[in-house]
Image (cartoon, rainbow, N blue to C red):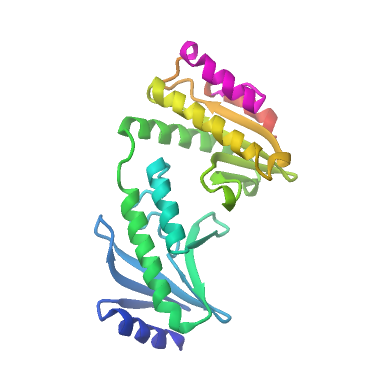
Amino acid sequence: MIHQDIYKDILHSFGSLWKYKERGNTLEIITPYATTNDKFVSVFLTKQGKDYIVTDGGWIHTEVYENIAKNDALCFQKIYFHYEETYNISSLNDKSGTTFYYKKTNNQVMVPALIFDLANFISTIVSTSLITFEDLKEKEEVESFRKKANHYLQALIVDKSVLKINKPVDDKLKTVRFNAIITHRNKLTLVNYITGSNQNYFVNSICKASVNFEIVLKSAYKDHIKNKLSFINNTAEGYHPSKLYSHMELLESVTKVPPILWSEKEKIKEFIQ
């Protein structure tokens, strides 16, 4: 069995503090690396054909480390992409939508190095996700509206496979995320949620949405975009129409359709059904 040989390599490389558990054909390697909330990092080793694959087991995405999987703060995103590139981390989603971070090699000698890289990546990303980069009231406002809007769209769309939540259109535009992407006959409907706990945050939300739409319109996907939609949380404290007119006008010049107010959310049906 390959697990015993590989584990001996790990002990030789790192020392006796590393432990493991057999999980069928997968080896859970419990590392001495810890997050800032005192969770020890595990990585999971499997072999597929000639490849040795080391993954996080989907634990970052499913918040096993009691981390924040969806930290959209710009500072966090910059740190995340830096370490993803530094450690050359790949990712994929399974059928349930769970994201797995992984590295692979066909050389058994390289396995300890992959484990080292992935363990460092997990420890850093989990710990960084716990940092409060944003105003707490604003963070709660954004998260609350996001959940309501997500649930509404998920209830409207029968075929869940056509709906992606909080994703970029592809890996080449990782920093340009949309709250929802709906695919229909090779055409994309892009949706941004706009809210804010005060006027400044609301303006920032409008500007971010406008810029994201403009960037994707200059990408290779420009001919595949059917609709560009904005969900406006007109119940938020930061929503003051008379003071947001210029910014809303700019947003509409990019989307070519009026923003959809949350109080009139049923209007989105004509664009996605």
Which residue is found at the position 32% from the left and 72% from the top?
30
Answer above or below: position of 212 versus 231. Answer: below
Please provide percent x and percent y for residue 249.
58, 18
Work out whether residue 188 or residue 106 is closer to the camera in this orientation and state it: 106
| Residue 259 in sight here | no
- Which quadrant of the figure has residue 117? bottom left
Q: Main secondary structure of the magenta part?
A: helix
Asked whether residue 98 is in view, the answer is yes
- Percent coordinates x, y for residue 241 in the rendering: 49, 14
Q: Is residue 172 above or below residue 235?
A: below
Q: Is residue 77 above or below residue 13?
A: above
Image quarter of the C terminus = top right
Residue 248, compared with residue 176, is above or below; it is: above
Front residue of 252/16: it is: 252
Which of the 4 image quarters holds residue 137?
top left
Q: Is residue 67 left or right of residue 166?
A: left
Question: Quadrant of residue 176 in the image?
Answer: top right
The residue stretch that appears in magenta: 241-261
Q: Tell how many labels.
A: 0
Where's residue 13, x and y in %?
32, 81
Q: Nearer the viewer, residue 223 or 266?
A: 223
The residue that appears at 55% across and 40% down in the rendered structure is 178
- Asked whether residue 247 is drawn in magenta, I would say yes
Q: Position of residue 81 (x, y in %)?
A: 45, 53
Q: Residue at x 46, y 59 (%)?
A: 85
Horizontally, residue 249 falls left or right of residue 233, namely: right
Residue lying at 48% horizontally and 79% vertically, measured from the top left: 25
Assess whether residue 253 is covered by the magenta stretch: yes
